[in-house]
Amino acid sequence: MTVTYTARVANARFGGFSQLLLLWRGSIYKLLWRELLCFLGFYMALSAAYRFVLTEGQKRYFEKLVIYCDQYASLIPVSFVLGFYVTLVVNRWWSQYLCMPLPDALMCVVAGTVHGRDDRGRLYRRTLMRYAGLSAVLILRSVSTAVFKRFPTIDHVVEAGFMTREERKKFENLNSSYNKYWVPCVWFSNLAAQARREGRIRDNSALKLLLEELNVFRGKCGMLFHYDWISVPLVYTQVVTIALYSYFLACLIGRQFLDPAQGYKDHDLDLCVPIFTLLQFFFYAGWLKVAEQLINPFGEDDDDFETNFLIDRNFQVSMLAVDEMYDDLAVLEKDLYWDAAEARAPYTAATVFQLRQPSFQGSTFDITLAKEDMQFQRLDGLDGPMGEAPGDFLQRLLPAGAGMAAGGPLGRRLSFLLRKNSCVSEASTGASCSCAVVPEGAAPECSCGDPLLDPGLPEPEAPPPAGPEPLTLIPGPVEPFSIVTMPGPRGPAPPWLPSPIGEEEENLA
């Protein structure tokens, strides 16, 4: 069974992982204690032979061999090779678990699309889910030793109720030398099509959804088959194993303690047990043992997948979902927070402190700025904030006086200039240019200029209080001037449109 310690490390605290060091089942000690004892036994045997068996000449030669092995053992890239290998194996291990065929999505679709409370409808739903479970059993007994021990033959599958005897005959009569885990999926498709013809599945969209979920389920079964077929390349596993074994074979000799009287460099201390060498062996060999356990998670190790448990769970919940729970609904009633504007579930005394904590609004929610830094700035090259009107800027430049009063001539011209410089369309500008009626043969006089920009032009006069619009001349495409009649009085322009300049002059007057 999988070793689960998640509840032990739910909260980070002082020495949180120290409680896990004493666990035996699924631990590194259980995996590595034999290899560690063998390494320590060989090391102690060489040390005893150096101290008590070899002659003086043989000791000198052994000492040179120790120095040589210790010098060149570091050339073996053990940590580099092991790191990549274990990363590959762990990623592969988790990907294989994600490919476990779980029927949860499929059973929800079957319960919602295959209708009928009679025995015929119930038989359709249960048979469909039994075919899905049969496909999972067939693929798992092909890749998992634990499942194969449970169902060693097809007869055991029939006796377990995953397959009928008639279905077994069809399964065995199908002439194919390949793994036939996909056969129940084809039966599922044929049975779903028959249910559609009988009206148990009411439309083609529901049938399409059902077959799509079946394909997802079948795809996971196929991926398990491919993971079992395509292993990590053997050369990679061999390189890692040879690198580790050769490194610690060199350490058996190169990490021996030599006689301090000989004056060898870094051999001033004589101990019997190589503590740090044993720790290094524990880490590196333990790393290889992790990869060895995870490279095939369908075995019977402590941390391998519980495939037989998954078979039992999947079969039971799928039958409950499509049979006992089919069309089984509770009475609809108003929930507890029906009239609440802000629904919030209650807290217990152990969690009420979380209610007092403010909700997260964003990482910039608490940033404060000075008032002057929050003013929008103009993008047209003028200084000052965007909310300031151009007139405020010009009036700050000109001296204040009687002429700058709201009713003075300079104030009116300044206000007219500022309003004229606002967004005015070409159509409104063209309509404001008028030519007076003149005698025949005389040159027309048109006033299209700006009274402020052209000092020779008089100020505009106020229009008469009432009466029809005067006749004006506007340039035409053929004749130099045409007499047209302007329309009647116009209403006020919408506030989102700029006012023509002619109306501005009237307002100024």
Image: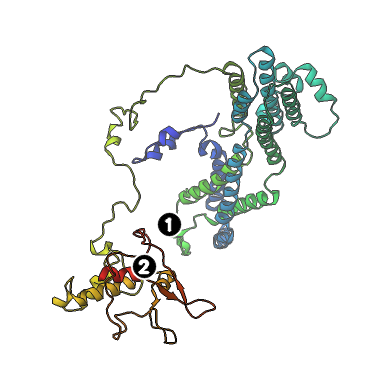
The x, y position of residue 486, in whole percent, is 41, 67
Question: Left of 302 or right of it: where is 498?
Answer: left
The x, y position of residue 495, in whole percent, is 34, 59
The x, y position of residue 191, in whole percent, is 74, 24
Q: Which is nearer the eye, 21 or 487? A: 487
Quadrant of the rendering where the C terminus is positioned: bottom left
Q: Would you name the residue on which mark 1 appears? A: 269
Q: Residue furthest left?
A: 402
- Distance between mark 2 and mark 1 Cα atoms: 119 Å
Query: In this view of the protein, can residue 240 be seen by the observer?
Result: yes
Question: Left of 446 or right of it: where is 184?
Answer: right
Work out whether 423 lies above or below 105.
below
Q: Would you name the residue on which mark 2 appears? A: 469
The x, y position of residue 496, in whole percent, is 37, 59
Label 1 neighbourhood size at 10 Å, few (<14), some (14-19), many (20+)? Answer: few
Q: Nearer the viewer, mark 2 or mark 1?
A: 2
- Tell me the kind of residue under disc 2: Glu
Q: Which of the two discs, 2 and 1, labels the residue nearer the N terminus?
A: 1
Work out whether 346 lies above or below 398.
above
Q: Please report the residue visible at 59 percent of the width from the left and 38 percent of the height from the top.
A: 98
Secondary structure of residue under mark 2: loop
Tell me, for residue 304, which label it has, or none.
Answer: none
Query: In this view of the protein, can residue 401 be seen by the observer?
Result: no
